[in-house]
Amino acid sequence: MQKFSRFSIIIPVKNEAQNVEILTKEIYKNCESMIFEVIFINDGSTDNSIEILSKLKNKYKNLQIINHKHSLGQSAALRTGILRSINNIIVTMDGDCQNDPADIKKILIKFHSEKNGLVLIGGVRKVRKDNVSKRIASKIARHIRRIFLNDEHPDSGCGIKIFHKKLYLLMPYFDHMHRFLPALAKREGGKVLSIDVNHRIRHNGKSNYTNLGRLIVGISDMIGVMWLIKRSPTKITIEK
């Protein structure tokens, strides 16, 4: 049986009371032979997510909860969790159960096969289970990122990713940065790879984002990331 380094699973949640217990059970089932921690960041939920998470913390080993009293957004929640994490390898997932914990082992195998430098591997949802409008919006965004950011990753918006914590900490932090992690990792000289992952239908709750909302903030974010890439320092080879 292959042994993996210790890793931290970071999961931002907002109003996912119906999903967090299901997701936690699946994670611990699929990772039972591994050494890991799970950090849920409750980002200002107005349902009873925090109550359910508190019960889960008493039931599961190495499960942490961070509570944002007010919603600060997904990028802020991810950063809070990553800064709190104790391991050098970070796995991120969405809290809506659309990412499949069965993919964690697969992305760990690919991650550990890369021996040199700092690495980010992002999932690619080959068969999207979202509605048509969301799939179209994602396809447009992907082409725009490729043209203006030289981001060749096929699915930057996929929530399941794995990367070195050190690589993340090299990136400039800003709101909504989670949508540009492959481009930002490349900016810092990291190796960016992709891997096909399962994508599931959202059975409970609803998305916290709309296509229009993504478009409005995405325009200014894109300009900012273009500036960051243009002003990036000379690439330096970085050891793990």
Image: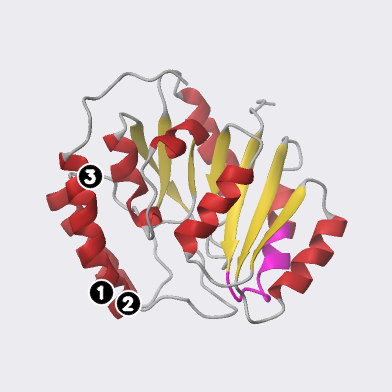
Q: Answer whether labels 2 and 1 touch (C-beta < 8 Å).
A: yes
Distance from disc 2 to disc 3, alpha carbons, whole Å, reads 23 Å
Q: Which mark is residue 216?
A: 1
Q: Residue at x 44, y 39 (%)?
A: 168
Is residue 21 shown in magenta?
A: yes
Left or right: residue 139 compared with residue 238: left
Q: Position of residue 223 (x, y in %)?
A: 18, 57
Q: For mark 3, what is the residue?
A: 228
Q: Which mark is residue 90?
A: none
- Of pointers 2 and 3, the one earlier in the residue sequence: 2
Above or below — where is 109 with respect to 140? above
Q: Position of residue 158 (x, y in %)?
A: 41, 56
Quadrant the N terminus occupies:
top right
Q: For mark 2, what is the residue?
A: 213
Distance from disc 3 to disc 1, alpha carbons, whole Å, reads 19 Å
Please, which residue is most extreme toward the right here?
58
Task: For label 3, count other residues whose C-alpha is less than 10 Å away and answer few (under 14), some (14-19) or many (20+).
Answer: some
For the residue labelled by badge 1, is the local secondary structure a helix, a strand or a loop? helix
Image: magenta residue range: 14-24
The quarter of the displayed image where residue 182 is located? top left
Of badges 2 and 3, nearer the viewer stands 3
Task: Give the amino acid type for the residue marked by disc 1 in the picture.
Answer: Ile
Closer to the camera, 229 or 61? 229
Left or right: residue 184 compared with residue 92: left
Is residue 32 shown in magenta?
A: no
Residue 199 in view in this figure: no
Q: Residue at x 48, y 76 (%)?
A: 207
Left or right: residue 35 compared with residue 15: right
